Amino acid sequence: MTLPQDPFMLLSFVNMKLRDLYPSLSALCEDLNENEEAVRDKLAKIGYFYDEKTNRFV
């Protein structure tokens, strides 16, 4: 499975997966074989940052 390329679609997809299936961003990225820093960087470009306490991008 590849992650959506559009940053807003990526945001929606990642937050849904974090809410429903994964306890952390690192667990999601490991399971999907994705680079965690690349995900963080792409979402940071649109003003979203990972919040470990709520396990979502805000």
Image (tube, rainbow, N blue to C red):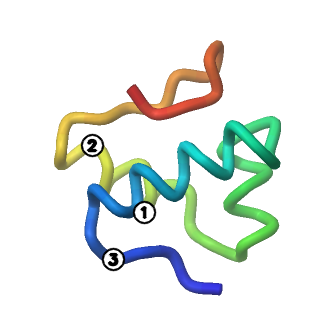
Reading the image, the residue beneath label 1 is: 38
Q: What percent of the width, then of the height, locates residue 35?
A: 56, 67
Q: Residues within 10 Å of mark 3 (few under 14, many from 20)?
A: few
Q: Amino acid at mark 2?
A: Ala
Answer left or right for 54 relative to 33. Answer: left
In the rendered view, tell whether residue 28 sits above or below residue 19. below
Marks counted in the figure total 3
Q: Is residue 17 left or right of residue 8?
A: right
Q: Upstream in the sequence, badge 1 or badge 3?
A: 3
Residue highlighted by disc 2: 44
Q: Position of residue 42 (x, y in %)?
A: 30, 57
Q: Residue at x 38, y 26 (%)?
A: 58
Helix, strand or loop status at disc 1: helix
- x then y, percent, for residue 1: 65, 86
Label 2 sits on a secondary structure element that is helix
User: Is residue 19 positioned above or below 36 on the image?
Assistant: above
Q: CA distance from mark 2 to mark 1?
A: 10 Å
**Amino acid type, residue under disc 1 in the picture:** Ala
